[in-house]
Image (cartoon, rainbow, N blue to C red):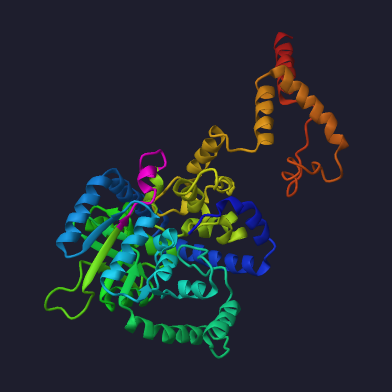
Amino acid sequence: MRSEAGRFVTAARQALTDTPLQDAVKRATDTAARKRDLAMFADGRDHGEALRQQAAAARHRALSQLPALLEQAEERLTANGATVLWATDDAEVCRHVQAIAARHNVQRVTKSKSMISEEVGLNDALIAAGIDVLETDLGEFIIQLAEEPPSHIVTPVIHKSKDAIRDLFVEKLGMPPTDDAQTMARFAREHLRAAFLSAEMGISGGNFIIAETGTLCLVTNEGNGRMVTTLPRVHVALVGIEKVVATLEDYALLTQVLPRSATGQALAVYTHMINGPRRPGENDGPEALYVILVDNGRSAIYETEYAEVLGCIRCGACMNACPIYEATGGHAYGWVYPGPIGAVITPLLTDLKEASPLPHASSLCGKCREVCPVDIDLPRMLLDLRRDLVNAGHTPPPWTVGIRAWSAVARSPRAFNAAARAAHIAQHALPQGRKLPLGPLGGWTASRNLPKVAAQPFRAWWAAREKARDRDEQS
């Protein structure tokens, strides 16, 4: 998927005028955030916070040993009968999957939810090769019908109302009109049933790989995940190299915080642990299992100060807590990963200059770190990316000149005092409401009043206070 993160400001402005979008996103994120808090702290806040820190330690432990764990995972997966392939970039991922499809004479593919497949543009690559591809996660199925990208990594159709989905089903699938959500879901399941039974290849993502056992782990809430990974004769799993964990115990810990943070559940409806393809004498499962370990920029992040972000378990909690995401929705971010995690990882995985608006798409309130189940310090990384943009010269010239001028004034007491006196005088010339004129500074007062400049600067007040104290002590 091609990044359009550079259009964030324009897209955000458009989203701010879309009342139905904002209503849908606010309703969904408020519900998700409330359910997350209830689930995470069901046994008390201290217990929930301890669980978060233990999960963070598990992710840090895995990242600190990542190269060795990946080699161990490959060895164990291979011993279990899986074929392990490595992909350095999006093009190689698509080539691998196309080659697998050709090798097994695949014409029809069903897909479980996979953000990496969105990241690498897999659907378009398969369709270009003449292969039918159908998303089977209900949310992904809806946005595929709508020809839109997902707007949330857990609930991809969060931006659509029930009425909009109904109209889409009526138009695209010929569904008899209904306002009943269960009837609509049943209609979608019936439509998908034939695809499940006829697909020759299923494609899934992977929430985790347990290195010590070579186990592929999937966490889902719909039966489609199991249908995709067991009914077709070929199963292909796309897994980011950062998703490896060391032990079964670490997985057991992480699979508790993931559903609590993502959907407010103590445990997901389906927890799949796949240990290879069908073995001799077994009746169920695919004939072949391929696990493609995807880099696509992750190794480059691993070598930087931003390596901590690779600990993300894709729960979406930061999006549900973010006031910017709530106001703009996910599509404004212009790539696969929206919200605070997207504001960090999109510039790192794509291009810092092209994605330059995203590190600024934050109020720095810190809520994203507060709700992160593995305690990733997203606010710090957002600030560091802003620093990197400045150091690389990717800031608008007027702002660069303005900040340098401010820095020069702030370093000189005489210039600072003169500027303060000038500001006190100039404020009386501002229009009612204390709004700055239109232009670079006008945006700052578009939603807030300019603070009043004191007649006496603090430095002068402090000097007068000390002088008066000395006088009193001498008398």
Where is 78 relative to 197, above or below?
A: above
Q: How far across and down, in percent of the image, does residue 253 sit?
A: 30, 58
Residue drawn at the location 73% of the way across and 50% of the way down: 447
Where is 375 relative to 385, above or below?
A: below
Q: 105 left or right of 380?
A: left
Where is 391 relative to 316, above or below?
A: above
Q: 242 left or right of 326?
A: left
Residue drawn at the location 30% of the way across and 65% of the way down: 99
Where is 29 relative to 384, above or below?
A: below
Observer able to see residue 315: no
**Magenta segment, which residues?**
293-306
Image quarter of the C terminus: top right
Which of 406/133 is in front? 133
* Outermost residue toward the top in this view: 474
Q: How far across and down, in percent of the image, does residue 431 sit?
A: 87, 43
* Outermost residue toward the bottom in this view: 176
